[in-house]
Image: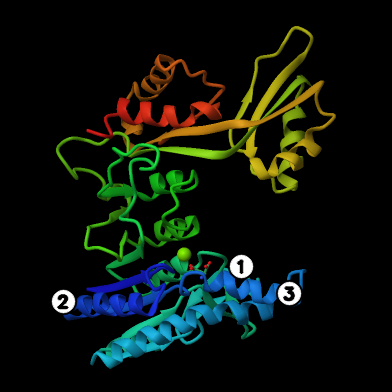
């Protein structure tokens, strides 16, 4: 098999940790696999480098320089890991993003990967070497070093796995995998064996921070089987894969995969909005132009005076920008940031009825008022008052038998 392994900052946080990682890489190689390793900077290094830059300037420094600076963190780790592997008698070679053929556009500090030229990688693998790639970076079409945005090493790993048609892409962090909900909220949360790309995207965008979202999207597009697991133990992780691979995983069909809590929500309510064609279009076009991320939207049926009310949610840090946009479009504007979004996520919803009603009944039984509801094929989201967020998560976790 060809396996891509990515190790995050805490996994390579100290020299001892890099030593541990080298052993894991060797075990994988000894089992008869070809191995490409992608590494992050040692934990804290990227932030430290940013601080160094800020010593000289408070304004964002020229991004080309910033990319030269930040890409150094990953180069340090990749070189050290390669040195450790060679020292143990396993031939390895460290590669920068450029050497690994990762070609990006020239959007410095948040570049997009355009293509990967695997020539060097394939040559080294053909010679039996372990390749250790510095994550988070590439080279622009203009020949300058670029970086892929914070957390971008995940993306490097997935892109390389896709380009090399790897059998597996393992993402090593300090957590065991993806859980049915945040174990800090519900200690009975269980680690999932498998989850589909779409479910993962829904859970991740709502705070289950195991993997960078962009990398899950890319894995879906390139059909890369991802496993997230811990480098601190030998527990099996969670496989993130296509929906086709989710079926017949067990006799009992799993309907719901997880419950997510998103605390970064604010609810905007517009009362007395004129009810005629084009009004909603005007409001949401203006919000979009300001790059404000609108999530749920509710419009009421028209009132007798020819007005209606309109509600929607935005991330809390975009709340004031949203206020500016909607000011004057309605008789009154109310913004409430004391709300959270609780979501039930599962592909099983597609083929089963009664899933949504169980969510509503469960919250009703707890005396929790639902302020807004939105649904998609695999998700039911509900806005409730902040103080009920964790209670709602625990009640739903139990109702859908996720702790069983
Ligand atoms: N070192 C980079 C960061 O901290 C990239 C990564 O770790 O994935 O954002
Ligand atoms: Mg990271």
- The number of callouts visible is 3
Q: Quadrant of residue 297?
A: top right
Q: Which residue is mark 3?
A: 61
Is the residue 120 above or below the residue 51 in the image?
below
User: Residue 197 placed where, x, y %?
Assistant: 38, 50
User: Residue 343 placed where, x, y %?
Assistant: 45, 34
Mark 2, ligand 2, within 8 Å: the answer is no
Is the residue 158 above or below the residue 337 in the image?
below
- Residue at the top extreme, as displayed: 304
Secondary structure under tag 1 reads loop
Q: Which residue is mark 2?
A: 31
For marks 2 and 3, the one nearer the N-term is 2
Secondary structure under tag 2 reads loop
Mark 3, ligand 1, within 8 Å: the answer is no
Q: Nearer the viewer, mark 3 or mark 1?
A: 3
Q: Residues within 10 Å of mark 3 (few under 14, many from 20)?
A: few
**Distance from label 2 to label 1 (Cα)?**
37 Å
Q: Which residue is mark 1?
A: 110
């Amino acid at each position: 098999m060809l396996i891509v392994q990515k190790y995050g900052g805490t996994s390579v946080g100290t020299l001892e940790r890099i030593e541990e990682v080298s052993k894991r890489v060797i075990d994988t190689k000894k089992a008869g696999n070809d191995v490409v390793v992608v590494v992050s900077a040692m934990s804290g290094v990227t932030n430290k480098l940013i601080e160094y830059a800020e010593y000289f300037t408070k304004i964002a420094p020229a991004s080309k320089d910033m990319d030269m600076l930040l890409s150094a963190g990953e180069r340090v780790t990749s070189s050290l890991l390669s040195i450790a592997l060679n020292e143990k008698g396993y031939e390895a070679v460290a590669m920068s993003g450029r050497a690994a053929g990762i070609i990006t556009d020239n959007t410095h500090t948040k570049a997009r990967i355009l293509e990967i030229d695997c020539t060097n990688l394939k040559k080294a693998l053909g010679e039996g070497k372990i390749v250790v790639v510095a994550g988070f970076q590439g080279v622009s079409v203009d020949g300058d070093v670029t970086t892929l945005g914070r957390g971008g090493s995940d993306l490097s790993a997935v892109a390389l796995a896709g380009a090399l048609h790897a059998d597996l892409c393992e993402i090593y962090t300090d957590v065991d995998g993806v859980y049915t909900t945040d174990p800090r909220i519900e200690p009975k949360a269980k680690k999932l064996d498998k989850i589909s790309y779409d479910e993962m995207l829904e859970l991740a965008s709502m705070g289950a921070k195991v993997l960078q979202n962009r990398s899950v999207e890319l894995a879906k597009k390139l059909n890369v089987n991802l496993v997230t697991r811990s480098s601190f133990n030998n527990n099996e992780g969670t496989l993130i894969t296509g929906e086709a691979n989710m079926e017949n995983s067990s006799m009992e069909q799993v309907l719901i995969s997880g419950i997510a809590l998103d605390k970064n929500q604010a609810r905007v309510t517009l009362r007395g909005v004129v009810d005629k064609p084009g009004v909603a279009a005007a409001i949401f076009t203006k919000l979009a132009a300001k790059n404000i991320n609108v999530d749920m939207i509710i419009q009421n049926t028209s009132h007798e005076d020819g007005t209606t009310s309109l509600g929607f949610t935005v991330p809390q840090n975009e709340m004031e920008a949203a206020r500016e946009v909607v000011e004057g479009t309605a008789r009154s504007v109310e913004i409430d940031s004391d709300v959270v979004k609780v979501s039930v996520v599962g592909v099983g919803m597609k083929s089963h009825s009664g899933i949504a009603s169980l969510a509503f009944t469960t919250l009703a039984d707890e005396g929790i008022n639902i302020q807004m509801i939105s649904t998609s094929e695999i998700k039911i989201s509900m806005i409730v008052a902040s103080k009920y967020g964790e209670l709602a998560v625990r009640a739903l976790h139990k109702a859908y038998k996720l702790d069983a």
